[in-house]
């Protein structure tokens, strides 16, 4: 059975997708993941959201589409070329703060901040600095990661890193975890 998305897309999504394709960026979140990100964002009214790994902003547009007017989103990426695409399409959204920075340095500088929703879509907050990012979750907050099923672009040895990450998350006593063999492989955790 093939999953099919029969729903509306964020207003800027198609134009962002064209701009993304023109750059050759190939690591954007898939549509099923994006749809889930939007739905989960809607579950956090007046929420403080964090996205680690903006890329060109495709998933960012879906998160914003699910957020209410009182919510805010900080999205961090280290590539100014890709981040520029996100900025071009999303800069008028007052709820969004785009930050060009190394993920590890940003987490280290901002580890005192607390969030209701974290989408970790880069190494920092996922394979690096996991404990530091999990400590940024409020009670009841969502921690979301994707690309946990084998991907064709994974380098040699990455499968072992993914398995270790899943085991590390499952061992955290303050997280309730759901592992989904769906889309690219999604894990959703809630901070107890």
Image (cartoon, helix red, strand yellow):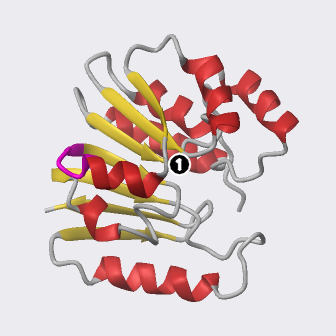
Q: Residue at x 39, y 53 (%)?
A: 105
Vertical arrangement, residue 172 with respect to residue 77, above or below:
below
Residue 168: quarter of image: bottom left
Q: Nearer the viewer, residue 114 or 163?
A: 114
Vertical arrangement, residue 20 with respect to residue 96, above or below:
below
Q: Is 101 left or right of 71, judged from the image as shown?
A: right
Residue 86 percent across, percent down from the top left: 61, 28
Q: Residue at x 44, y 66 (%)?
A: 126
Residue 24 percent across, percent down from the top left: 84, 45
Q: How many marks?
A: 1
Q: Residues within 10 Å of mark 1 (few under 14, many from 20)?
A: many
Q: Nearer the viewer, residue 36 or 115?
A: 115
Verify whether residue 112 appears in magenta: yes
In this orientation, does residue 11 appear? no
Q: Is 168 left or right of 38, judged from the image as shown?
A: left
Residue 21 percent across, percent down from the top left: 83, 38
Q: What kind of element bears circle 1? A: loop
Residue 185 percent across, percent down from the top left: 56, 67
Magenta residue span: 110-115
Q: Residue at x 70, y 35 (%)?
A: 81
The residue tagged 1 is: 53
In this orientation, does residue 88 appear? yes
Vertical arrangement, residue 151 with respect to residue 61, above or below:
below
Is most of the magenta stretch helix, strand or loop? loop
Which image quarter holds the N terminus? bottom right
Residue lying at the far top of the rendered structure: 92
Q: Nearer the viewer, residue 11 or 94?
A: 94
Verify whether residue 67 appears in magenta: no
Vertical arrangement, residue 91 with respect to residue 85, above or below:
above
């Amino acid at each position: 059975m093939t999953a099919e998305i029969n729903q509306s897309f964020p207003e800027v999504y198609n134009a962002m997708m064209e701009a993304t394709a023109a750059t050759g960026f190939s690591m954007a979140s898939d549509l099923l993941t994006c749809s889930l990100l939007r739905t989960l964002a809607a579950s956090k009214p007046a929420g403080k959201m964090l996205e680690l790994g903006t890329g060109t902003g495709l998933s960012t547009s879906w998160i914003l589409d699910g957020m209410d007017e009182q919510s805010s989103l900080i999205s961090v990426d280290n590539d100014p070329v890709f981040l520029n695409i996100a900025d071009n399409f999303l800069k008028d959204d007052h709820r969004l703060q785009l930050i060009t920075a190394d993920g590890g340095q940003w987490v280290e500088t901002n580890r005192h901040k607390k969030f209701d929703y974290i989408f970790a879509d880069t190494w920092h907050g996922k394979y690096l600095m996991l404990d530091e990012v999990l400590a940024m979750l409020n009670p009841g907050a969502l921690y979301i990661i994707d690309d946990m099923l084998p991907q064709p672009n994974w380098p040699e040895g990455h499968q072992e890193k993914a398995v270790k990450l899943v085991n590390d998350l499952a061992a955290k006593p303050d997280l309730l975890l759901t592992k989904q063999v769906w889309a690219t492989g999604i894990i959703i955790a809630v901070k107890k």
